[in-house]
Image: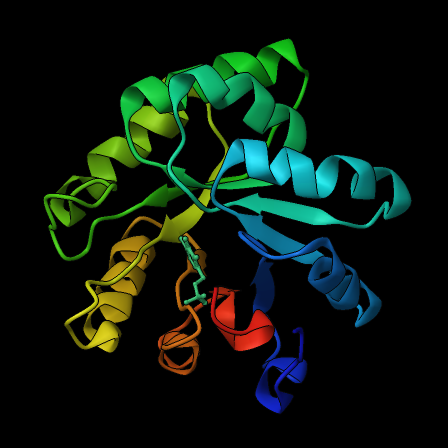
Amino acid sequence: MFSLPADLKELPGGVTLIAVTKQQSEDDIHQALAAGLRHFGENRVQEAQRHWSQQRAAYSDLTLHLIGPLQRNKAADAVALFDVIHTVDREKIARALKSEMIRQKKDIPCFIQVNTGDEAQKSGIAPSDVRDFLHLCTAEIGLNIVGLMCIPPVDQDPSVHFRLLKKSGDACGLTQFSMGMSGDYRQAIAEGATHIRVGSALFGAR
Ligand SMILES: *Cc1c(COP(=O)(O)O)cnc(C)c1O
């Protein structure tokens, strides 16, 4: 059941709400569209195609964000469907995305995912590698990297991680920060988020 909380209705300037529609029904997606939302996030390419391939034709002003890990064999489909990719996290993916963008004549803005908690099971590059990886992605591969993205460890104060992400990006001249989910988007905004990725606070528990 979709509903838009008051504080998400009136976000500070410069903050984009990405409504995360993974595992949501078509009906809920329609309600979010009817409420005027136009930025949507998905974490799987195939599910995103199911949710959005048709809607693309109906809504010319949609912006679709890939927020989940990307496999190399899905790079072509991802480049065909998404407008922004938040999860560039290794050289192979960066190269695969770039060659698909050339083939499809697109230049899709991308975020580098940073594993701010250095968690073994989580995707993202180590905070200490941000500068080198950014240089590889931009100067060598030619991707359009606009910012950094993180998912803080569940058991820690998220503000510490948001601050670390912001500091890393500032140091490299990046200006966009994809951080904050349903449980912590207020903290993320306070720390300088430009994109918050919100699912359950809009649609209820999955
Ligand atoms: C699912 C997901 C979200 C949204 O999570 P909620 O807690 O439901 O707001 C945000 N970011 C990523 C990367 C996700 O996979």
Residue 108, image quadrant: top right
Question: Does residue 198 sit above or below 135 in this rendering?
Answer: below
Residue 6: % across, % down: 63, 90
Question: Does residue 191 sit above or below 80 in this rendering?
Answer: below
Residue 149: % across, % down: 37, 52
Residue 83, image quadrant: top right
Question: Does residue 51 sit above or below 30 in this rendering?
Answer: above
Q: Name the residue located 36 percent from the left edge and 77 percent from the top edge.
A: 184
Answer left or right for 200 relative to 51: left
Q: Name the residue located 29 percent from the left edge and 22 percent from the top edge.
A: 91
- Work out whether residue 147 or residue 47 is closer to the camera in this orientation and state it: 47
In this view, the residue farthest toward the bottom is 6
Residue 82: % across, % down: 62, 36
* Picture quadrant of ligand 1: bottom left
Regarding residue 83, the answer to whether it shows in the image is no
Answer left or right for 90 relative to 47: left
- Work out whether residue 51 or residue 7 is closer to the camera in this orientation and state it: 51
Q: Name the residue located 86 percent from the left edge and 48 percent from the top edge.
A: 59
Answer left or right for 58 relative to 3: right
Image quadrant in which the N terminus is located = bottom right
- Work out whether residue 183 or residue 30 is closer to the camera in this orientation and state it: 30
Regarding residue 98, the answer to whether it shows in the image is yes
Give the colour scheme shown: rainbow
Question: Does residue 191 sit above or below 126 in this rendering?
Answer: below
Residue 47: % across, % down: 57, 38
Residue 84, image quadrant: top right
Question: How many numbered marks, from 0 up?
Answer: 0
- Work out whether residue 56 or residue 171 is closer to the camera in this orientation and state it: 56
